Amino acid sequence: MSQASGGPEIEQLIQLLSRLPGLGPRSGRRAVLHLIKKKEQLMIPLAAALDRAVAAVKVCETCGNIDTVSPCTICSDPRRGESGLLIVVEDVADLWALERAGIGAVRYHVLGGVLSPLDGIGPDDLSINQLVGRASDYKEIVIGVNATVEGQTTAHYITDRLADSGIAITRLAHGVPVGGELDYLDEGTLSQALKARTKF
Amino acid sequence: MSQASGGPEIEQLIQLLSRLPGLGPRSGRRAVLHLIKKKEQLMIPLAAALDRAVAAVKVCETCGNIDTVSPCTICSDPRRGESGLLIVVEDVADLWALERAGIGAVRYHVLGGVLSPLDGIGPDDLSINQLVGRASDYKEIVIGVNATVEGQTTAHYITDRLADSGIAITRLAHGVPVGGELDYLDEGTLSQALKARTKF
């Protein structure tokens, strides 16, 4: 087994790549073979890109976004402060998804997860205190955590913490996804979509 | 869109990782976020492992295996020559799969693909001439190409080229996979398994 995959350097690369989400031992091995076959076009550029990213990546000390500067480009863009909107998300991936959707000049706050007493994750493990600290700079806090049980618990906790601040607190609308078919949607979404119906 | 994912260094890393087999734009982004979250445990070791592999990886000039030396550890191990068995495979992944199976001290020959006239892949695009050149050093050539139409065409072509050499040419047995259920197997495999039945 030891030398089965061409030397310790290759074996170690397979093991590390296998730990990426979406890859396992078998696909990690396939990925390494693919890299080696495309050494000039893919492997060397990827090695260089990783080295550059390792050196450049920073977590924004204000909002928790990942960028190459801190505060991040979103937090240091004054135009984004003018909207007065602060969207609270669980994860950087959610922030990026909203940015890709082109929702406009807003700011974000990345919680770094959701409250989950069973996993021992309390308010101090998330950036909730930092959120309370910066909330007063904004007119409206939009809760954009996922619509899971833990997400909703977290949303309620944040709402409680900000209750006395006088800042408007809203949440993203539930409803039928654009392009989605009713037949494939769960009952919770459908009943929320009916309750929140709007004029045609 | 341009700054949606935190700076050009991160965007470029996402694009390169998305080109690995098994990953796409979405899972590439998830992989990069995972790397950044586990910077010390995963991202930095992966960057170092890639750099080391880029410097170390060599394609064996004898058999086509990927290793850190050429001739590879398999080709330069005299014990593996004594068996007189040379297994012909399509790809390095097949070689690694046979090695993981611990099939014993044999040598290999990696074709680098299969004959595919429709894709413009002829005998000179594979390492068939090299195979004919080294075949006389072995007692038996075991054809281990995949049981696809192109694989079988390639197997027949190799058999023709080696017909006058007097070297025994065999192929891997077809049959029921160990642990496999008959109900899930195709008719071709089942009829081959019946034809090649052995004494209990």
Image (cartoon, coloured by chain):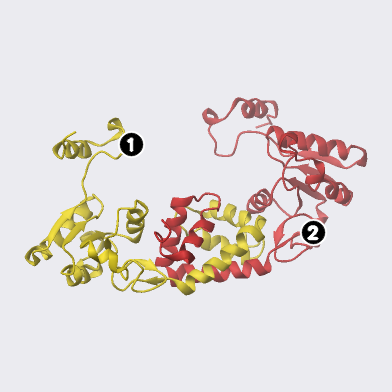
Chain colours: A red, B yellow
Distance from disc 2 to disc 1, alpha carbons, whole Å, reads: 54 Å
Q: Which residue: 27% across, 63% down?
A: B107
Q: Chain of mark 1?
A: B
Residue B27, how many percent across, how many down?
54, 51
Q: Amino acid at mark 1?
A: Gly
Could you say which disc has been placed on residue B66 in the image? none
Q: Residues within 10 Å of mark 1 (few under 14, many from 20)?
A: few
Q: Residues within 10 Å of mark 2 (few under 14, many from 20)?
A: some
Q: Which residue: 24% across, 60% down?
A: B88
Could you say which disc has been placed on residue B179 in the image? 1
Q: Does residue A58 appear in this view?
A: yes
Q: Please say if A99 is above or below B191.
A: below
Which residue is denoted by mark 2 in the rendering?
Answer: A61
Q: Residue B177 sits in which quadrant?
A: top left
* Closer to the eye: label 2 or 1: 1
Q: Does residue A138 appear in this view?
A: no
